[in-house]
Amino acid sequence: LFLRDNMEFPYVRFDMFGAANYTGLIATFILIALFATSNDWALQKLGIKRWKLVQRWNYLLFFMVGLHGILYQTIEKRVALLVFIFVGILATVLFFRFFWFSFSKAVVIYIS
């Protein structure tokens, strides 16, 4: 947000460029919070439940970064193939996060 000379209130962009910037800004704040709480001292001060709640913001961070990237790819009028590649990379990461690691844990438990 910034002030324009002829406006008395902060200027907020409601277009795709503004949305891309704000998703990046929110992602940055979440990342700072995660960096600040990713240590033993924060775990002791927050307690396990609150610390885990903050660490679960990683999922929101992933979504915001993905949305930020897609919006900027669209703004820059990139070739549609690049946007599809970016979405494919995001989908692959989600697949490994939610399906592959669950499967590999089950296999490890079964083999052990």
Image (spheres, helix red, strand yellow):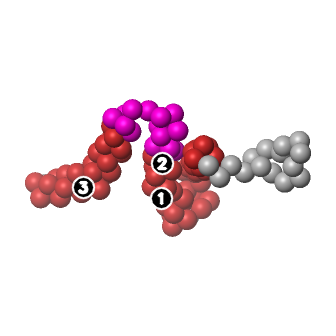
Q: Quadrant of the C terminus?
A: bottom left
Mark 1 → mark 2, Cα distance in angstroms: 18 Å
CB contact under 8 Å: marks 3 and 1 = no
Q: Is residue 79 above or below residue 43?
A: above
Q: What amino acid type is highlighted by mark number 2?
A: Leu
Q: Is 31 placed left or right of 87 in the picture?
A: right
Q: Which residues are magenta?
A: 68-83
Q: What amino acid type is highlighted by mark number 3?
A: Phe
Q: Disc 1 marks which residue?
A: 56
- Residue at 22% in and 51% down: 100
> Looking at the image, is mark 1 or mark 2 earlier in the sequence?
1
- Residue at 59% in and 54% down: 42
Give the SS element for disc 3: helix
> Looking at the image, is mark 3 or mark 2 earlier in the sequence?
2
Q: Disc 3 marks which residue?
A: 99
Q: Is residue 40 above or below residue 74?
A: below
> Looking at the image, is mark 3 or mark 1 earlier in the sequence?
1
- Residue at 44% in and 32% down: 78
Q: Residues within 10 Å of mark 1 (few under 14, many from 20)?
A: few
Whether residue 72 is in magenta: the answer is: yes
Q: Nearer the viewer, mark 3 or mark 1?
A: 3
Q: Disc 2 marks which residue?
A: 67
Q: What amino acid type is highlighted by mark number 1?
A: Arg
Residue 70 percent location from the top left of the image = 46, 43
Mark 3 → mark 1, Cα distance in angstroms: 18 Å
Q: Is 66 placed left or right of 2 in the picture?
A: left
Give the SS element for disc 1: loop
